[in-house]
Image: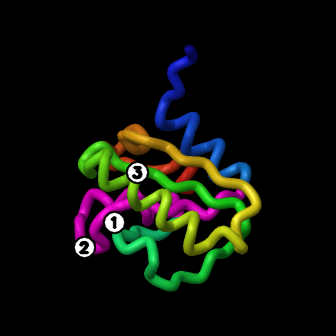
């Protein structure tokens, strides 16, 4: 099985125009930073109404968030939004993009 690096995942989602939803508390700095870097949204309540920018959705769980709760989040999010989803990617245990040359974590070429 090929191990995919966080940078490859980030570039793949960005290049494929996925709307990235990062599972976690909206006020958690790590979750918020990851969502911002991927031009996505942090979300903990899968039934909260959000505007989906595209029908291609990526659900990510940062390593700081629990796996069992993420599984429940995914199933409830999909059930609540199934009519708006064309393609879905679920990425478990995402560590985030690597640090850039200034030590900040970010997308290649500034996102």
Which residue is disc 1 drawn over? 32
Which of the two discs, 3 and 1, labels the residue nearer the N terminus?
A: 1
Residue 46 image position (x, y, % from top left): 44, 71
In front: label 2 or label 3 = 3
Which of the two discs, 2 and 1, labels the residue nearer the N terminus?
A: 2
Which residue is disc 3 drawn over? 71
**Element type at marker 3?**
helix
Q: Is residue 27 left or right of residue 48?
A: left
Q: Residues within 10 Å of mark 2 (few under 14, many from 20)?
A: few
Name, please, the residue furthest toward the right: 86
- The circle drawn on residue 27 is 2
- The circle drawn on residue 48 is none
- Residue at 49% x, 29% y is 5
- Residue at 31% x, 45% y is 67
Q: Is residue 42 above or below residue 101?
A: below
Q: Quadrant of the C terminus?
A: bottom right
Q: Is residue 84 above or below residue 65?
A: below
- Residue at 71% x, 73% y is 83
Q: Quadrant of the N terminus?
A: top right
Instruction: Reply yes or no: does residue 47 show up in magenta.
Output: no
Q: Is residue 20 left or right of residue 27?
A: right
Residue 78 image position (x, y, % from top left): 57, 64
Q: Is residue 93 left or right of residue 4?
A: left
The answer to whether residue 11 shows anywhere in this view is yes
Residue nearest the observer in this picture, 88 or 82: 82
- Residue at 47% x, 57% y is 74
The answer to whether residue 100 shows anywhere in this view is no
Q: Is residue 28 left or right of residue 53?
A: left
Instruction: Reply yes or no: does residue 37 show up in magenta.
Output: yes
Report the Cα–Cα distance between label 2 and label 1. Answer: 7 Å
Point out the stretch of residues depicted in magenta. Answer: 17-39
């Amino acid at each position: 099985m090929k191990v995919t690096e966080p940078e490859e995942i980030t570039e793949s989602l960005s290049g494929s125009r996925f709307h990235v939803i990062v599972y976690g508390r909206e006020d958690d700095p790590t979750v918020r930073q990851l969502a911002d870097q991927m031009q996505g949204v942090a979300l903990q309540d899968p039934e909260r109404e959000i505007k989906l920018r595209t029908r291609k959705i990526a659900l990510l769980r940062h390593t700081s968030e629990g796996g069992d709760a993420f599984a429940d989040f995914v199933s409830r999010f999909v059930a609540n939004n199934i009519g708006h989803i064309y393609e879905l990617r679920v990425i478990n245990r995402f560590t985030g993009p690597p640090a850039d040359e200034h030590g900040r974590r970010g997308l290649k070429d500034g996102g």
